[in-house]
Amino acid sequence: MRAVEIPPPVPIGKIKSFGPFGPKYEVGQALRRKDDGDWVVEVTLVDSGERAEYRLIRLLEDPEAD
């Protein structure tokens, strides 16, 4: 039987930007764990509404947007 993996805390609903000057995105929920231990998180681009997948380790390094 496979163990259920509990995702790490994710700042769901926070608005962040890709780096200091990149586009803004809203943080969604963790989707799945990668083989390297990192998690894939769903993000929604604020300007276009487009949804994308983004690595949690990068998301945590991105600044909060105004």
Image (cartoon, rainbow, N blue to C red):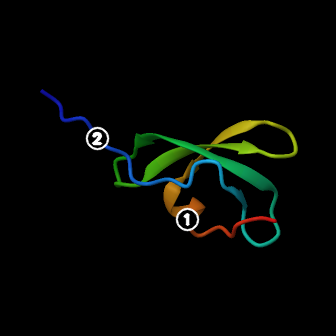
Most foreground residue, 13 or 34: 13
Crowding at mark 2 (Cα within 10 Å: few <14, some 14-19, many 20+)? few
- x%, y% of residue 7? 38, 46
Crowding at mark 1 (Cα within 10 Å: few <14, some 14-19, many 20+)? few
Lateral position of residue 19 relative to residue 22, left or right: left
- x%, y% of residue 6? 31, 43
Q: Residue at x 50, y 53 (%)?
A: 10
User: Label 1 sits on what residue type?
Assistant: Leu
Residue 34 higher or lower than 62, as above or below: above
User: Label 2 sits on what residue type?
Assistant: Glu
Q: Residue at x 34, y 48 (%)?
A: 35
What is the quadrant of the C terminus in the image?
bottom right
Residue 28 higher or lower than 21, as above or below: above
First in sequence: mark 2 vs mark 1: 2
Q: Residue 22 bears which disc, if any?
A: none
Residue 3 figure quarter: top left
Residue 52 figure quarter: top right
Q: Residue at x 44, y 49 (%)?
A: 39
Q: CA distance from mark 2 to mark 1?
A: 20 Å
Q: Mark 1 — residue?
A: 60
Most foreground residue, 61 or 36: 61
Q: Mark 2 — residue?
A: 5
- x%, y% of residue 42? 59, 41
- Which type of secondary structure does the marked residue at label 1 adopt? loop
